[in-house]
Every structure is written in structure tokens, then in C-alpha cells.
Amino acid sequence: MYNKWFYITEKIGNNFFSFDKRKNKQLWVPSLKKINNFNEIQLQEDKEKIAFEDFDFEDKLSTNYGLKNFYEISPPNSPLEGGNNCPIYLFDNHNHALFFWYLAKENWLIKQKWNILYHIDEHADYRDPWITLEKTDLENIFKYTNFSDINVWNYIIPAEKEGLIWKTIQIRNTMNLENYLENKNKYKNNIILNIDLDFFQPDLDFIDYDLKKKVILDIAKKASVITISTSPFFINQELAIKVFKYLFN
């Protein structure tokens, strides 16, 4: 799984959006690469390898390129402070987080059930795909994540219904950030930190950057696994990587 790149060519998942209106009928998904430092992160420059494509609010086609690879930064190379060496998974479209949560489960980094998800994002990603997750072996999770109706909007609820996630805590604005700091000791174990870097896109600059960073790093110190999306449709990818490095490096 993710050991080699591939295309999604059917009208499914993220390729469903505006499929009938787009000339391009395929989206590219890169392979996973383990890295030792953030300088190894590269953006995709091949114009044939589109990560996400859809029409924006002005009905203009937005063609977006993501990462050259998905990246895993694992112990002992994890850059987190406070003694936490949990792995960080960096990828473009956010639905891929679902696979990496189950990979963490397979590797006994998180509990088999009842984990806490901190979801830090401009969007809730909380639509219900209404497709049942019946088998949770990694091969099936990989197919479910990439070759079904799972997309960037609806990948959380399946993990809740299956029981992997017991509680999802949404952090999407200043009030949510402040509420976390007031109750930050409520949950200390079995934590998944799930970040969409579009939370740092310029339209959200009215939310204090230092407050965002303070909350993210506090959760990161307690997390058992961290999944991070660069979200190419919603934030410039060079900015996304810059923010990622500022946060964790």
C-alpha cells in the first residue's frame, strides 16, 4: 500500500468532483517515502500528475498539484519536543488520513478502539459517506480510502462508526482553540492529531498564529500519531510546507 504511485481514473473519491465537466479524468496519488528531515520534502512539478481538480466558487477550474511523495517522519527522526517520538504522516488530500490511522492501529501506536481525534482544520470533513467499513485489514482500508466514495469531506465518520475513534474534537476557530487550552488536561492518552494546513490559509489570518501553534504543539506532545494534509485545493502548497516546517521544525 502506497509503495508505488498510481492514478485514480474512475468517477470515485476525490475524482468524483466535477468529473463530468473536467477534461482531465484522473488524479495522481504518490507513493510513501520515509525521510529523516524536512529538507527532503518536495512538491510535485510534473503537470501531468494532478492531485485535485474542481471548479471554485467563481466556477473557474482549479487544477492543483500536491506533493512529490507522501512522507513519513518516524522515530528517532521525529522532531517533536517533550519526549514524544510519534510518527508524522504528511500527504496532500485529507482522506488519506484514514489509512494512516489504521496503519497506526496495526503498529499498536493507538488503541484498537476508542481513540480521541483532534481535528484541526478550516473544514469539518464530517459528511457521512453512507458506505460501510466492514473489513479493517490494511489492504481493504487502502482500497476503501482510494477506490470508493471516500473523499476529503467524509473520511472521519467511517472510523467513528467502526469504533476506532470514540470522540472527535473539532478545532476550527479561535473559540475552539481557547476552549482546548482551558480543558487541555481532559484527555492525555490515545490521541490522534489530525491537521489540515488550510487552517493557515490567508483568509484565516485573523486567527492568531501563535495561538494555533501553541495548541497544535501541546496536542502533538500527547499524540500517538499525527496526520497532516497539505490540502492543495484550499491552500498554496509552498505556503503549506512553509507553515509545516515553522510548526514542527
Image: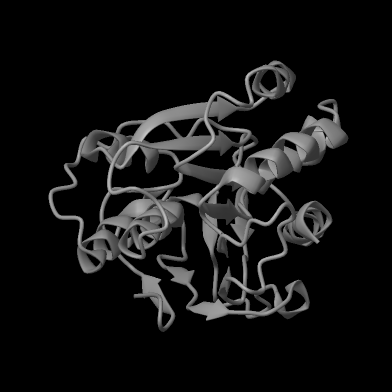
Seen from this angle, which residue lies furthest front?
A: 83
Classify residue 176 by image quadrant: top right
Answer above or below: position of 149 versus 199: below
- Regarding residue 87, the answer to whether it shows in the image is yes
Classify residue 185 by image quadrant: top right
Instruction: Name the residue: 21% across, 35% down.
Output: 130
- Regarding residue 20, the answer to whether it shows in the image is no
Give residue 180's position: percent from left, percent from top.
65, 23
Specify the quadrant that holds the N terminus: bottom left
Please say which color scheme the image uses: one colour
Instruction: Name the residue: 63% across, 19% down.
Output: 183
Instruction: Name the residue: 47% across, 78% down.
Output: 31
Seen from this angle, which residue lies furthest left?
A: 134
Classify residue 198 by image quadrant: top right
Answer above or below: position of 52 versus 118: below
Q: Is residue 69 left or right of residue 42?
A: left
Specify the quadrant that holds the C terminus: bottom right
Give residue 178's position: percent from left, percent from top.
73, 19
Give residue 161's position: percent from left, percent from top.
24, 34
